């Protein structure tokens, strides 16, 4: 049902946890499935220097949270904002159609964190 990449990111999530010195957080949830995601950012000179996440949810929710942190780390804010749910899905090999909303949630959380950073640092 899940790709090898999804299972790897579920069993060995990257960048999991709250950053001690985060500058912004994006918090999203899906009331239908119950998934909750938080993305934490540390920005230096407009680049995502560090990123972390906390997710309560299914295999796909944890895997997509892990993958979006990998895709965004080291990118400028502008580059990170261009990441789409299809990029997350492709990087994970694939997701079942009923789990695509998890990839979308991870993108929403990242964009909310970037938005919060911009609002507090403009």
Image: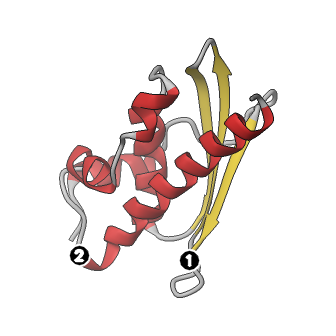
Foreground residue among 3 and 88: 88
Q: How many marks?
A: 2
Q: Residue at x 54, y 48 (%)?
A: 111
CB within 8 Å, label 2 to label 1: no
Q: Position of residue 113 (x, y in %)?
A: 64, 45
Quadrant (top left/top right/bottom left/bottom right) for the C terminus: top right
Q: Position of residue 90 (x, y in %)?
A: 20, 49
Q: Residues within 10 Å of mark 1 (few under 14, many from 20)?
A: few
Whether residue 3 is visible, yes or no, is: yes
Which badge, 2 or 1, comes first in the chain's sequence?
Answer: 1
**Is residue 96 shown above or below 111?**
below
Foreground residue among 115 and 35: 115
Label 2 belongs to which residue?
97
Q: Residue at x 65, y 34 (%)?
A: 41
Name the residue furthest top.
45
- In space, the residues marked 2 and 1 are separated at their CA atoms by 16 Å
Q: Position of residue 78 (x, y in %)?
A: 45, 30
Per the rendering, the mark at residue 30 is 1
Foreground residue among 55 and 41: 41
Per the rendering, the mark at residue 3 is none
**Is residue 47 shown above or below 17?**
above
């Amino acid at each position: 049902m899940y790709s090898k990449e999804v299972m790897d990111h579920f069993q060995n999530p990257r960048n999991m946890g709250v950053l001690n010195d985060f500058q912004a957080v994006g918090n999203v949830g899906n009331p239908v499935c119950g998934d909750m995601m938080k993305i934490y950012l540390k920005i230096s000179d407009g680049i995502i220097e560090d990123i972390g996440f906390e997710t309560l949810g299914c295999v796909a929710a944890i895997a997509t949270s892990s993958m979006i942190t990998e895709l965004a780390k080291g990118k400028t804010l502008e580059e990170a904002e261009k990441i789409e749910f299809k990029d997350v899905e492709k990087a994970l090999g694939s997701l079942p159609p009923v789990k695509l909303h998890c990839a979308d949630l991870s993108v929403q959380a990242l964009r909310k964190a970037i938005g919060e950073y911009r609002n507090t640092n403009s």
